[in-house]
């Protein structure tokens, strides 16, 4: 699925199942909540925090994928609401980073 297809699919879902978009501020708060859920899982899967129960550890990677999808969904909602074409925005971001960081990362001794 392309980013354009994802934006259209989310818009179709909102209009048929979701009733309407939450307002932009609510969706921003929901996005922060979802990012926090990713952070919690990352701290336990890859960081030094431990899981409270062994069962939680067994499903953690699957949960992480679901939380990442939740973040993407809300981000797409916000893009749709604000008229952002994510394909165009990502292309511009990659171009900016390529120009800005053309030599920066290759010469960073911490990355070698």
Image (cartoon, rainbow, N blue to C red):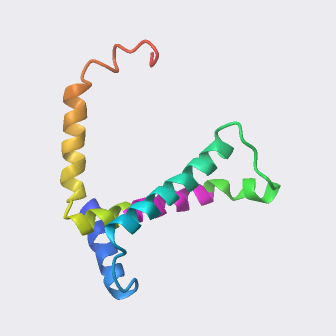
Q: Is residue 111 left or right of residue 36?
A: left
Q: Is residue 17 above or below residue 28?
A: below
Count of marks placed on residues: 0
Give coordinates of residue 83: x percent, y percent: 19, 64
Give the quadrant of residue 29.
bottom left
Q: Which quadrant is the C terminus positioned in?
A: top left
Q: Can residue 43 be seen from the camera position used here?
A: yes
Segment colored magenta: 62-74
Give coordinates of residue 40: x percent, y percent: 62, 50
Q: Can residue 1 be seen from the camera position used here?
A: no
- The structure residue drawn at horizontal position 57% and vertical position 48%, both measured from the top left corner, is 39
Q: Is residue 106 left or right of residue 4?
A: right
Give coordinates of residue 2: x percent, y percent: 28, 61
Q: Is residue 65 magenta?
A: yes
Q: Is residue 52 above or below residue 1?
A: above
- The structure residue drawn at horizontal position 32% and vertical position 67%, both measured from the top left corner, is 24
Q: Which quadrant is the N terminus positioned in?
A: bottom left
Q: Is residue 67 magenta?
A: yes
- The structure residue drawn at horizontal position 20% and vertical position 46%, both measured from the top left corner, is 91
- The structure residue drawn at horizontal position 36% and vertical position 65%, both measured from the top left corner, is 25
Give 23 or 19, whichever is nearer the viewer: 23
Q: Main secondary structure of the magenta part?
A: helix
Give coordinates of residue 111: x percent, y percent: 45, 19
Give 15 or 30, whichever is nearer the viewer: 30
Give the quadrant of residue 20.
bottom left
């Amino acid at each position: 699925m392309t980013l354009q297809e994802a934006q259209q699919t989310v818009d179709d879902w909102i209009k048929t199942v979701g009733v309407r978009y939450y307002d932009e501020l609510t969706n921003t708060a929901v996005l922060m909540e979802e990012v926090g859920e990713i952070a919690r899982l990352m701290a336990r899967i890859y960081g030094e925090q431990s899981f409270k129960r062994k069962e939680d550890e067994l499903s953690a990677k699957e949960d992480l994928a679901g939380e990442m999808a939740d973040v993407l969904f809300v981000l797409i909602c916000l893009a749709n609401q604000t008229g952002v074409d994510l394909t165009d925005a990502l292309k511009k971001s990659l171009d900016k980073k390529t120009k800005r960081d053309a030599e920066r990362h290759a010469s960073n001794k911490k990355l070698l």
